Amino acid sequence: MADVSFLSANLAMAYTAYFIGTASPGPSNLAIMSIAANHGRKPALAFAVGVISGSMCWAMIATLGVSAALIAYSQFLVALKIFGGAYLLWLAFKSGRAALLPASAKSAVSIDGVRLKNIYLRGVLLHLTNPKAVLSWVSIVALSSHDGTVQSAVVPGCASISVTVFCGYALLFSTPTARRVYLRMRRWLDGGLAVVFGVAGWRLLSSRT
């Protein structure tokens, strides 16, 4: 009974830590919200699936113990910070440019297969270039490293949380009501998104960890 309680407690801690990190406002969630409200459900879901894929990629690497070895090399984290920070600044530029455009100048995003694939890859890239994602998964896996049963349940459970949260944001913010609100406040929201991305990118590039 004590062993069962210990396993349950470890799983609960891992799931709670992952849920808080996943559901909290951040570049990935804000990007999903913006794409959903601006371009609709399919592009938002494609981006969300990309973010989930990136997260699960780090999960597999962390589970295999590779990420712990990678973060031991400062050059790896420095390179990841540069790529991640530059990508966030690029997103800030795009959001800022969108905020300056009049509504009539904003063209609809194509949702054909090629375009959806590109949006998916953007989601993957956003998460793969986030050093915090690596460190987060290393911590989560460490919570379950004392028992193989717990560790084998962590990734599937966190994958379910990831799908629920990211796809949930995509579905919620692509509703007609959310899109009407976005259209009325588009410039302010895109401008705010540019600031968030810009600050996140600058902080990532200037951080020492």
Image (spheres, rainbow, N blue to C red):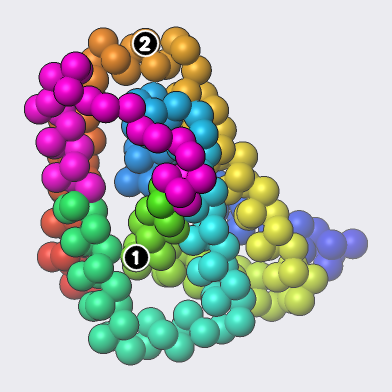
- Which residue: 35% across, 37% down? 30
Residue at 48% over, 80% down: 67
Q: Amino acid at mark 1?
A: Thr
Q: Furthest-right residue in view? A: 1
User: Could you tell me if residue 22 is visible in this image?
Assistant: no
Q: Which mark is residue 129?
A: 1
* Label placed on residue 180: 2
Q: Residue 97, relative to residue 13: is it above or below?
A: above
Q: Residues within 10 Å of mark 1 (few under 14, many from 20)?
A: many
Residue 134 in the image: state x and y as whole percent. Answer: 43, 69
Q: CA distance from mark 2 to mark 1?
A: 32 Å
Quarter of the view holding residue 61: bottom right
Q: Residue at x 39, y 28 (%)?
A: 39
Depth check, front residue: 133 or 194: 194
Quarter the C terminus occupies = bottom left
The stretch in magenta equals 91-117
> Which residue reaches farthest left?
100
* Residue 68 showing in the rendered view: yes
Residue 115 on the magenta segment = yes
Locate residue 186, reporting x and y percent.
Answer: 23, 20
